[in-house]
Image: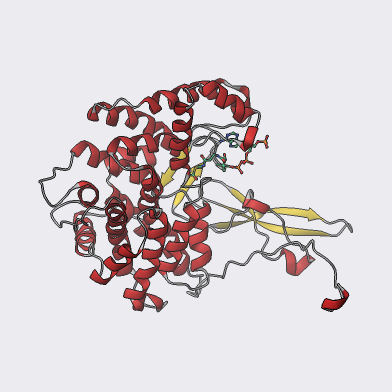
């Protein structure tokens, strides 16, 4: 970040007073007005519900230009990472700000392999949940519970690298165990001979009674899906991780909070909501034009799920990659999913319709990801868990960036997240005794 001394912004107040505020310029020439001193100097705060226009931090992790449809992790375009990297390498890149060399990659992969088991006592937790439990409820509770098994994570000054690899590795085991529990199959332990994504597919779909071969096409597709979800700067769940972490809460607690924020249908829950929407349309005879008409007329508050984005006002670059991947995976599996035809039909109409065009609503990452997961055999209520698996390195990278940031003198810069408000309630009232009310 650089404060450009030549650039300032001037604010004029209702009483005619003026204040001059510094302007901060990012690497990609993004400009922000630094309002840190505003309240102290003028008594005013800024009001921006939904943080539509508020930068909560500077960050060197992800660059995203919603108008141009650009997404880069640590400077590397998402398209190149999806094609050439794998999820473990991309996780390392996000967390440690470099592509690992051979030795670093092996070391990191080995740590992930060696920390994949969860404490045997934790298996009882799975038994305690009803089979109908949503796996996001189980995942978030289990991630919080990890802090009970690794109490040194509560010490803010303890080395965190081991906890980071533990989390990345164990979340995959927890996710697959919660699925196995929900369908009544025996839990499949991780296998050290398998790579990260193959190991996950094995834990999800193998059974002890027969051999299981992981399909290389599905392994590659999963790597790509997780890479595409790995970070997206200050979205709802990442901001939650930062907010919870800013109080000094431990890494596991901050990540569990991020998982819960992701769950909502306007965020990571959208991939499940897309499939539910497509199924509903198919069940009611496949008339997606009528559905689009309902959306445009805001009947029953309907939205075209998987469309629109707070930041992208152009085609989401991740959706472009996913659309292509969707065709490839379905062709490889020989799956003909009628929901894909409904989705493509809806996209075609929406991209030409003035309602969607004028509001700059394009398919987002969730529009096609659910169809791919479905074809891979992953049940609908696990989709958001898949998103959480992918987003984990991004959450960790942001948490690490925040807690490790230092000023020029080497002092920590982290501040507890604590927005202000404009109070609109009653002025002081006198307490009324019960008998007089
Ligand atoms: N379908 C129909 N209309 C929409 C949609 C949609 N999917 N998204 C936005 N709009 C309309 C709104 O009704 C609003 O119209 P108005 O100006 O007439 O009132 C306008 O577009 C602006 O919408 P907002 O909700 O103000 O936009 P915001 O930036 O707050 O919301 C969001 C972004 C939440 C993603 C929204 O587009 C949405 O609800 N999309 C569907 C859910 C979804 O796919 N979420 C996943 C996002 S990606 C992710 O988190 C991984």
Taking the spot 82% from the left edge, 77% from the top edge, the residue there is: 434
Q: Quadrant of ligand 1?
A: top right
Displayed quadrant of residue 15: bottom right
From the viewer's side, name the closer residue of 96 and 431: 431
Taking the spot 31% from the left edge, 56% from the top edge, the residue there is: 178
Residue 200: x and y in percent read 24, 51
Q: Which colour scheme is used?
A: secondary structure
Displayed quadrant of residue 335: top left
Residue 389: x and y in percent read 35, 52
Q: In this view, does 88 lie above or below 252?
A: above
Q: In this view, does 43 lie above or below 49?
A: below
Question: Residue 266 vs residue 400: left or right?
Answer: right
Residue 107: x and y in percent read 20, 61
Residue 45: x and y in percent read 74, 61
Q: In this view, does 197 lie above or below 80?
A: below
From the viewer's side, name the closer residue of 53 and 212: 212
Whether residue 22 is visible, yes or no, is yes
Whether residue 431 is visible, yes or no, is no
Q: In this view, does 372 lie above or below 248?
A: above
Taking the spot 26% from the left edge, 54% from the top edge, the residue there is: 100
């Amino acid at each position: 970040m650089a404060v450009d001394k030549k650039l300032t912004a001037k604010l004029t107040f209702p009483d005619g007073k003026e204040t001059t505020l510094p302007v901060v310029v990012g690497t990609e020439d993004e400009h922000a007005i630094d309002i840190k001193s505003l309240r102290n100097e003028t008594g005013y705060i800024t009001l921006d519900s939904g943080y539509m226009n508020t930068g909560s931090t500077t960050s060197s992790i992800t660059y995203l230009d919603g108008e141009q449809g650009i997404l880069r992790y640590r400077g590397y375009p998402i398209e190149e990472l999806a094609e050439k990297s794998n999820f473990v390498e991309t996780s390392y890149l996000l967390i440690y700000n470099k592509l690992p060399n051979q030795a670093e990659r092996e070391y990191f992969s080995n740590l992930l392999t060696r920390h994949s088991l969860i404490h045997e006592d934790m298996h009882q937790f799975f038994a305690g949940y009803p089979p109908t439990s949503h796996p996001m409820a189980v995942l978030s509770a289990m991630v919080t519970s990890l802090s009970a098994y690794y109490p040194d994570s509560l010490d803010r000054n303890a080395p965190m690298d081991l906890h980071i690899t533990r989390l990345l590795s164990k979340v995959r085991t927890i996710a697959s165990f919660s699925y196995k529990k929900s369908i009544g199959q025996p839990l499949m332990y991780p296998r050290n001979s398998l790579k990260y994504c193959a190991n996950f597919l094995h834990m999800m779909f193998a059974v002890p009674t027969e051999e299981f071969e992981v399909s290389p096409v599905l392994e590659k597709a999963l790597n790509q899906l997780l890479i595409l979800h790995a970070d997206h700067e200050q979205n709802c769940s990442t901001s939650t991780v930062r907010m919870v972490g800013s109080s000094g809460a431990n890494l596991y607690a901050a990540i569990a909070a991020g998982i819960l924020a992701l769950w909502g249908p306007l965020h990571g829950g959208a991939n499940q909501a897309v499939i539910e929407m497509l199924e509903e349309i198919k069940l009611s005879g496949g008339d997606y034009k009528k559905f689009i008409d309902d959306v445009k007329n805001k009947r029953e508050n309907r939205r075209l799920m998987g469309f629109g984005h707070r930041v992208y006002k152009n085609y989401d670059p991740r959706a472009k990659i996913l659309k292509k991947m969707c065709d490839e995976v379905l062709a490889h599996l020989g799956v003909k999913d009628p929901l894909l035809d409904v989705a493509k039909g809806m996209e075609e109409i929406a991209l030409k319709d003035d309602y969607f065009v004028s509001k700059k609503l394009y398919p987002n990452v969730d529009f096609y990801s659910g169809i791919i997961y479905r074809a891979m055999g992953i049940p609908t209520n696990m989709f958001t868990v898949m998103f959480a698996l992918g987003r984990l390195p991004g959450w960790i990278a942001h948490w690490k960036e925040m807690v490790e940031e230092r000023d020029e003198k080497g002092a920590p810069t982290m501040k507890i997240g604590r927005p202000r408000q404009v109070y609109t309630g009653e002025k002081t009232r006198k307490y009324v005794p019960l008998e007089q009310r």
